[in-house]
Image (cartoon, helix red, strand yellow):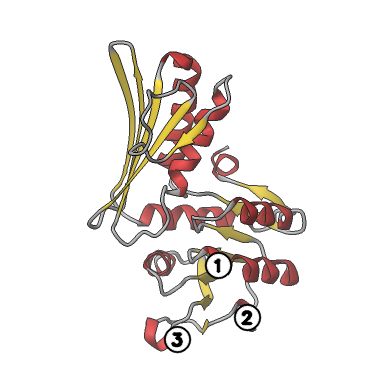
């Protein structure tokens, strides 16, 4: 049985992960990390406010919380040699560099999106970029619920990075055009965010060229897909040596 520590257990995604794990006999959440108590969260496992207070052994830690918790989670992982599945979005470049450094000591699985479909979309977008090249303008539109804090989404940035890696020229990202009084440049990738209602997650990659437009889209119908992806990543990570892993490693 795979024993899991769940960081952000009382949040919306934490509750989804808890529900999904409860339906899987081969997994068990043995502890949670959250500001709320176990009673407040109606959790069947102990909930700790700080990672350093955890006195329960586990095979892996899954994190759906807040970027501010990253230092304590990395410290916990390194001190206990616990593999980390980091699903939180909104990390700064410095934070990403920090988790990459930690992966030299422990196994770290990091992805801005845990969905199989989204990661397939990225591969298709990279293929489209190689075929269409600089003749087509590229724009990314992402839509999420009105409670999401970070913008653009980590997934939108993953898509942009994937597309950029497939092109010969160096691309730069443009997030807002209202103050830009000039024509669009060829080496731009526009990234646009919408926050409204209860949208789980939608991403469109638009390739607009001479007289034709190609759009590659993904729409998440439930948060379960992200929870199940995290659980699969946890199983994948257990027993691995130190290193940085992502969805491409899992899919392959």
Residue with the most extreme bottom position? 39
The answer to the question of whether label 1 and label 2 lie on touching residues, with beta carbons closer than 8 A, is: no
SS at mark 3 in the image: loop
Q: Earlier in the sequence, mark 1 or mark 3?
A: 3
Q: Quadrant of residue 15?
A: bottom left
Q: In the visual, does 129 lie left or right of 147?
A: right
The answer to the question of whether label 1 and label 3 lie on touching residues, with beta carbons closer than 8 A, is: no
List x then y, in percent, for residue 149.
Answer: 39, 60
Q: Residue at x 44, y 23 (%)?
A: 185
The answer to the question of whether label 3 and label 2 lie on touching residues, with beta carbons closer than 8 A, is: no
Q: Residue at x 42, y 49 (%)?
A: 153
SS at mark 1 in the image: helix
Residue with the most extreme left position? 197
List x then y, in percent, for residue 170.
Answer: 58, 26
Mark 1 and mark 2: Cα distance apart in space = 23 Å
Which residue is more in the foreground, 119 or 186? Answer: 186
Which residue is under mark 2?
Answer: 56
Which residue is under mark 1?
Answer: 68
Q: Residue at x 49, y 26 (%)?
A: 126
Mark 3 and mark 2: Cα distance apart in space = 16 Å
Q: Is residue 120 above or below residue 237?
A: above
Q: Quadrant of residue 107?
A: bottom right
């Amino acid at each position: 049985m795979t024993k899991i520590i769940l960081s952000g257990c009382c949040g919306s995604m934490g509750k989804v992960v808890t529900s999904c794990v409860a339906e899987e006999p081969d997994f068990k959440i043995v502890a949670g990390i959250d500001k709320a108590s176990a009673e407040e969260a109606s959790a069947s496992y102990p909930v700790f406010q700080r990672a350093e207070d955890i006195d329960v052994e586990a095979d892996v830690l899954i994190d759906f919380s807040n970027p501010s918790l990253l230092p304590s989670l990395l410290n916990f992982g390194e001190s206990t040699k616990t593999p980390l599945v980091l699903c939180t979005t909104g990390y700064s470049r410095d934070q990403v560099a920090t988790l990459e450094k930690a992966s030299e000591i422990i196994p770290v699985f990091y992805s801005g999106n845990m969905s199989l479909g989204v990661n397939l979309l990225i591969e298709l977008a990279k293929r489209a970029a190689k075929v269409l090249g600089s003749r087509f303008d590229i724009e990314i539109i992402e839509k999420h619920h009105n409670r999401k804090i970070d913008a653009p989404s980590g997934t939108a940035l993953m898509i942009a990075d994937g597309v950029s890696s497939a092109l010969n020229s160096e691309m730069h990202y443009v997030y807002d055009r209202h103050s830009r009084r000039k024509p669009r440049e060829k080496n731009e990738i526009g990234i646009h965010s919408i926050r409204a209602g209860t949208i789980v997650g939608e991403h469109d990659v638009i390739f607009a060229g001479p007289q034709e437009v190609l759009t590659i889209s993904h729409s998440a119908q439930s948060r379960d897909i992200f929870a199940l992806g995290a659980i699969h990543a946890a199983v994948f990570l257990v027993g691995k040596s130190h290193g940085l892993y992502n969805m491409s490693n899992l899919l392959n």
